[in-house]
Image (cartoon, rainbow, N blue to C red):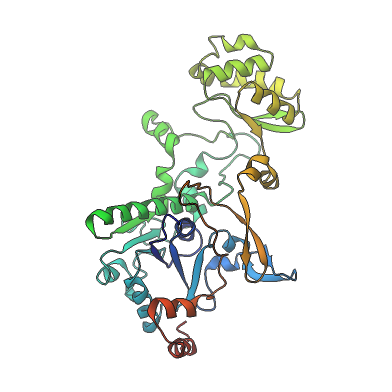
Amino acid sequence: MTALSHLKVIDLSRILAGPWASQILADMGAKVIKIERPGEGDDTRHWGPPFLNDRDGKPTAEAAYYLSTNRNKQSVTIDITCPEGQELVRELVRGADILLENFKVGGLAKYGLDYASLVSINPRLVYCSITGFGQTGPYAPRPGYDVLLQAMGGFMSVTGRLEGEPGAGPQKVGVAVVDLLTGLYAATGILGAIASREQSGKGQHIDLALLDVEVACLANQGMNYLVSGVSPKPMGNAHPNIVPYQDFPTADGAMIVAVGNDGQFARLMAEIGQPGLGVDPAYATNGARVANRDALLAIIREATVLRTTGEWVEALERANVPCGPVNSIAEVFADPQVVSREMARTIEHPLAGPIPIVASPLRFSGTPVEYRNAPPLLGQDTDEVLRDELGLTAERIAELAAKGVI
């Protein structure tokens, strides 16, 4: 039994934010039917290298990017620009609970696949629209991309090296964090709308904008500005509100120390041979440490370079001071905690046999996540879905294929 096995999703989205949301729902058991353009499919299918190798070690057309966000789905190719294709989607929507799309504002209205058109045939439909800037406002018609939104929404203004340091300047996060956060908000909002439908019997439209998500996720940095009136600046790996909470050099590299309270700070000072600083009024409280940041960091750095990262991690863990290495991605997947939690798993792919996937972080005690199907080949489920969901005959499916509708 899975948590969402009773729900059916029609996924008209592509690239990352929408597919990330639908993969979350699919992992929890929802039936996700991914509608793709015949012959082309989701843009990310072509975003490589790297591409998956088949059983003989030869490259396929399956990009790793696409594989990261489309497991547990069915791929159905339908040309929604033609009337017969639009009607197929409408028929699928009649029996669906959720529709996800990330077309430009108004882009689906000309196909009769917008919320106003579809709610008339399925009042229980939860319809989630993901755009760069939302359905309203002066920027609504603009396209939105993650790196653009990281710049416009403020993330890049607080990410990167301190002003004046070598390499300073606008810096994006190393993954498409706005898309990923939007996918998480989309999944959360969809489940909220489904819960509301249990009471009202009616679905609703969710208007989700990447810019809104990023502004919401400015979190403490956003509130720091609203309370102080001062725009936060990039601080490298340091924290604007907590000290010491950043990277420090070691004899063989670097480590992170994340002191969250005064007790941890006192234990850190004892470990670096400066126990008096743990009770010194200039450093004993977090507010004092923030005020005297530069002097304190210099003292800590003088000590941390005397031992290796491994030696420090062992010593500080023993002292109950949060710390850890700065891992590469390879080191992440070799980490004993990550291995123990089975965050890298395998799934059977039709071309390559067993392939690696990154697991869901969700751990349910009663309805566990299932890894049922590898990310589908383009259109691999078209015949099955049209037959089982809509009752089309083999002859009718062949006719639609001959016309290029599917």
**Image quadrant in which you'd find residue 140:** bottom left
Q: Which residue is drawn at 54% across and 17% down?
A: 263
Q: Where is residue 144 in the image (x, y as percent from the top left)?
A: 45, 58
**Residue 37 in view in this figure:** no
Q: Residue at x 57, y 31 (%)?
A: 238
Give 226 or 316, whichever is nearer the viewer. Answer: 316
Side of 308 relative to 343 (left or right): right
**Image quadrant in which you'd find residue 257:** top right
Q: Which residue is drawn at 38% across and 79% down?
A: 390
Give 399 or 43, whichever is nearer the viewer. Answer: 399
Give 29 or 47, whichever is nearer the viewer. Answer: 29
Q: Is residue 289 above or below residue 221?
A: above
Side of 87 relative to 323 (left or right): left
Q: Position of residue 291 (x, y in %)?
A: 51, 19
**Total numbered labels placed on residues in the image:** 0
Q: Position of residue 387 (x, y in %)?
A: 43, 80
**Residue 182 in view in this figure:** yes
